[in-house]
Image: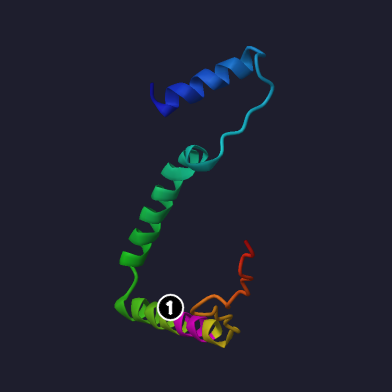
Amino acid sequence: MSIADVISLINQTEADGVVDRYAIGGAVGATFYLQRIIESKRAWRRSLAQRPVAEKLALLDELRDRARAIRAAATRRKVVRLRASPPGYRIKPRKD
């Protein structure tokens, strides 16, 4: 049974009144948008391919500047360093 069959079956149970409303989450829920995302990315890539070389180079410069700004902001953040070894614990000797 494919995902489409399962969705169709769930939709039919909702139409029959067996369930009121349902939600699908996670990876299965994302499959509803996957085709639209792929089509959008392809359209974006086609539009980029049609742009003049100078415009493409300007986009690369903007991306490089953005990456540098992100990297600089990340290095300015306070970094919490963990100890290389755990602190020593006081262990009382057992009295037998």
**Residue situated in front as seen by the camera: 17 or 83:** 83
In the displayed orientation, state which residue is furthest to the front: 96
Image coords of residue 88 (percent x, y): 58, 77
Residue, disc 1: 63
In the rendered image, residue 57, in percent from the top left (x then y), is placed at 34, 81
* Residue displayed at 38% across by 21% down: 1
Q: Is residue 52 magenta?
A: no
Residue segment shown in magenta: 66-72
* Kind of residue at disc 1: Leu
Mark count: 1
Q: Nearer the viewer, residue 84 or 39?
A: 84
Classify residue 54 as left or right of residue 91: left
Circle 1: element type: helix
Question: With respect to residue 10, does 71 lie above or below?
Answer: below
Residue that sits furthest to the right in the current view: 20
Where 59 falls versus 42 (above or below)? below
- Which picture quadrant has residue 94? bottom right
Q: Residue drawn at (59%, 83%), measured in percent from left and top?
A: 77
Residue occupying the point 57% across, 82% down = 79
Q: Position of 31 compared to 22: left or right?
A: left
Which color scheme did the rendering employ for the protein? rainbow
Q: Main secondary structure of the magenta part?
A: helix
**Vertical placement of residue 93 versus 23, above or below:** below
User: 76 or 55: nearer the eye?
Assistant: 76
Residue sitting at 58 percent across and 80 percent down?
80
**Residue in the foreground of this view, choosing between 40 and 6:** 6
The percent position of residue 89, horizontal first and vertical second, equals 61, 74
